[in-house]
Image: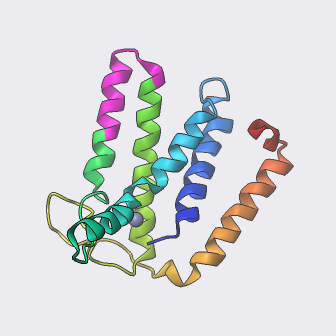
Amino acid sequence: MALAVTHIILTIAFLDIFRHYVFGLKKFPRYLLVIGGIAGLAPDLDIPLGWILTILTGNSVNVHGLFTHSIFFALLFALIGAILHYQKNLKWAKIFYVIAIGWTLHILLDCFYGMDSSKLFLWPYSILPSFCPSWDLYQYAHSTDAIILVLWLLHEEISNKIKCYF
Ligand SMILES: [Zn+2]
């Protein structure tokens, strides 16, 4: 698994590229970046859920990677987005699209980072992810965070975009 900051920053940077160069600021309001960033981390909500279940049941419970890391959720959010889009509810359609993107990026990152081959990326099918490249990037997790953050910050400064955040 990648670190929490990587999940959030990478999703925001990814969405930000589309915001600036494809859709434009008006069609892509800033709050979508916030929602996308949180969605980029959301599949890991099963970690605190495990802690809560551990406290409640008195047994060590670990549900990490059992359900929320399934591509099924990303597809479901994209489908809800498409239905809302069809109903011309653009605001909520965009919100669901952005959640689907954040969720997908999370799964891809975990796939590349390796370390835990027990995640069910295809839940409800219990197929283990032999298709993941699992490059074991986890050992570089902290440096990766720093590099992504610096590159994004430089881009924002050089292209004068950082003011969009204030
Ligand atoms: Zn994860």
Q: Nearer the viewer, residue 59 or 50?
A: 59
**Bounds of the magenta span?**
77-91
Q: Can residue 45 be spotted in the picture? A: yes
Residue 19: x and y, percent? 63, 36
Q: Please, is residue 31 above or below residue 66 in the view?
A: above
Q: Quarter of the image holding residue 142?
A: bottom right
Magenta segment's dominant SS is helix
Residue at 40% x, 15% y: name it.
88
Q: Please, is residue 149 above or below residue 86 in the view?
A: below
Q: Judge left or right: residue 155 versus residue 80.
A: right
Q: Quarter of the image holding residue 20?
A: top right
Residue 68: x and y, percent? 30, 57
Pick out the residue farthest to the bottom.
139
Residue at 59% x, 34% y: name it.
31
Residue 67: x and y, percent? 24, 59
Q: Quadrant of ligand 1?
A: bottom left
Q: Can residue 63 be spotted in the picture? A: no
Quadrant in which the N terminus is drawn:
bottom left
Quadrant in which the C terminus is drawn:
top right
Q: Quarter of the image holding residue 139?
A: bottom right
Colour setting: rainbow
Q: Nearer the viewer, residue 34 or 98?
A: 34
Residue at 45% x, 82% y: name it.
136
Q: How many marks?
A: 0
Residue at 47% x, 30% y: name it.
94
Q: Judge left or right: residue 147 versus residue 47.
A: right
Residue 16: x and y, percent? 64, 43
Q: Please, is residue 83 above or below residue 65 in the view?
A: above
Pick out the residue farthest to the left.
125
Q: Judge left or right: residue 69 versus residue 39.
A: left
* Magenta stretch encompasses residue 88: yes
